[in-house]
Image (cartoon, coloured by chain):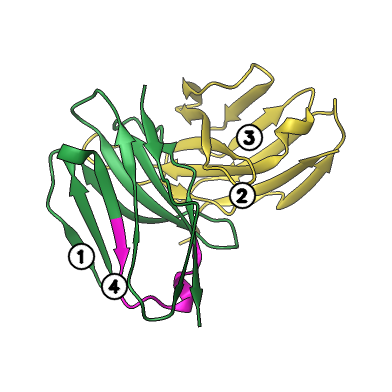
Amino acid sequence: DAGVTQSPTHLIKTRGQQVTLRCSPKSGHDTVSWYQQALGQGPQFIFQYYEEEERQRGNFPDRFSGHQFPNYSSELNVNALLLGDSALYLCASSLDVLSAYEQYFGPGTRLTVT
Amino acid sequence: AQKVTQAQTEISVVEKEDVTLDCVYETRDTTYYLFWYKQPPSGELVFLIRRNSFDEQNEISGRYSWNFQKSTSSFNFTITASQVVDSAVYFCALDFGNEKLTFGTGTRLTIIP
């Protein structure tokens, strides 16, 4: 049973560029959340997708956008990259069941902005 | 607003010693969930435990145990007889059942052989 997968593993971009990160959820999961983890910090919630729509959003600017596909996989897009966007981007998947849930995290994509 | 504080930035202990990681949270909600995650050098967050606000029973899983005290808003994590494989960054997190986790800043645990 494959867990959460993310691609690419590492990425180096230049300030002002745009980047797309990808996530495939754990088999059977329908909800995908994205987190940004700066060096030495805890992950911060960016947004969550369910049924191909953004359901919740954290305190991140509109430069951060996403998409969820019918197969539940998801993309995170960041426009006009800033040096401060350098971080580990984590994807988490879960099953939207009211009574209980558990988020499974992928290994992350490490983005470096120069 | 909710907040999770992990005051211990780094802890080092010699193998086989017991170690406790502290977690203090703030919330005005009465229904919430508390979590602990382990992050090894590979970067992937590994789920350890989830506890809801109505269940104050302590839990033990092998060498791991958790102490939830609502009166002090704390959810501490103890590793008994630590091993080198326990070396990692540990995060405490808070959630309101909406899968939007609020994490603490983490505690880096190093087990010295």
Q: Secondary structure at mark 4?
A: loop
Secondary structure found at label 3: strand
Number of numbered labels in the structure image? 4
Instruction: Give the residue at mark 4.
Output: B63
Task: Work out whether residue A96 can be spotted.
Answer: no
Q: Colour of chain A?
A: yellow
Q: Give the residues drawn in magenta, as a range.
A: B77-88
- Cα distance, mark 3 to mark 2? 13 Å
Colour representing chain B:
green
The residue located at (37%, 81%) in the rendering is B16
Image mark for residue A74: none
Residue at numbered disc 3: A75
Q: Position of residue B81 (x, y in %)?
A: 33, 78
Q: Chain of mark 1?
A: B
Q: Are marks 3 and 2 on the same chain?
A: yes
In this rendering, the answer to whether B76 lies above or below B41 is above
- Image mark 2: chain: A
Hey, what amino acid is under mark 4?
Arg
Q: Looking at the image, which residue is at 84% across and 28% down?
A: A17
